[in-house]
Image (cartoon, helix red, strand yellow):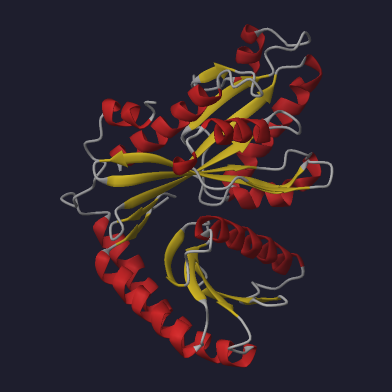
Amino acid sequence: MTDFLLFDEEFHLIKDVISRLKTDAQAKVVFIVDKNGQQIAAQGDLESLDTTSLASLTAGNVAATDGLAKLIGEKEFPVLFHEGERDNVYIAIVGQRVILVVIFDERSSLGLVRLRVRKATQDLEKIFITIQKKIETEKDRKDLDSPFAEITDEDIDSLFRE
Amino acid sequence: MTFINYAAREINCKIVFYGPGLCGKTTNLQYIYDRTNPSARGKLISLATETDRTLFFDFLPLDLGTVRGFKTRFHLYTVPGQVFYDASRKLILKGVDGVVFVADSQEARMDANLESMQNLERNLKDHGFDLATIPYVLQLNKRDLPTAVSVDEMFRQLNFKGEPTFEACAPRGTGVFDTLKAVAKQVLMELRKK
């Protein structure tokens, strides 16, 4: 199975899109997670948030919902919405591979978020198609500067030293 | 499926602890959490029932430090062991990089071990993985119990490809970090091959 590689150029493009989305949707936080629970990028008021846990739980949530969808004969539920007393979470699947999460409060509205997410999703889909193509090209390149090609036993042991 | 972020110079790997119900998967994670420097770990999240049985998964993010300038992060997950949670169990294996099979040493649980291992093989296959080639470590847990089957017998029944095998007593921590280290090492070695 091919690894997921993220390079500088696309990383900045993704950050631009979610940063714009955060402003346009008047959201508190916007982040992107892959379906395996790894956070790809985040924008907004992140200091009070455990984004690693959020990423993992979001992916679990989407995976469970995907399972539910298949059980009733749907391909997927592309949008999930959780409404809280103060904050709300809007989750959208991008290109069947990554998950876009928007956290917003009463300064915004579900309608506005939904509208802005639709546009951002299109932009993100294009970026992730580019990433996918790049991964396919890069994996055949022998000269790619892989940080792990020359990893030694000692490097690995050093990770576990007290 | 490892996530290599060249922009943030980070590498993220996913390790799943698998095994029959009550074999000690969550206890492994709990011990790792308790014994890891708080700056190197995130929160331990347990999605459990009211009786503390794993309902969906436990999750523990670990920062192992830097290799070749890349921050190395491992995300540890457990699956719910109870047979009827198979749909959830399968979901957790998505994108896995390495598996730890936690076997229960008690004689009465040998059938459950074998059944769970077959289930692992089947669920991996559904995600396009092969148990024969994926980074994999076997842990023989609960070695301290009087009803424990001999190590030789367990090895004969459960070790099928010469995978690294560790005796453990998870609440006391015996074998827990050895197991983690062995699977992490295989995952990183796999990256070298790519």
Q: Position of residue A23 (x, y in %)?
A: 44, 86
* Picture residue at 31% right of the left edge, 41% below the top: B66
Q: Position of residue A59 (x, y in %)?
A: 58, 60
* Picture residue at 68% right of the left edge, 7% below the top: B150
* Picture residue at 36% right of the left edge, 74% below the top: A15
B87 to B153, vertically: above or below:
below
Q: Is residue A124 left or right of residue B118?
A: left
Query: In this orientation, which residue lies closer to the viewer: A13 or A25?
Result: A25
Examine the image and state in which quarter residue B84 appears: top right
Q: Is residue A53 left or right of residue B187?
A: right
Q: Is residue B147 left or right of residue B65?
A: right
Quadrant location, the C terminus of chain A: top left
Examine the image and state in which quarter residue B145 appears: top right
Residue at the extreme left of the image, as rendered: A143
A131 to A1, vertically: above or below:
below
Q: Position of residue A43 (x, y in %)?
A: 43, 72
Q: Position of residue A9 (x, y in %)?
A: 25, 70
How many labels, in total? 0
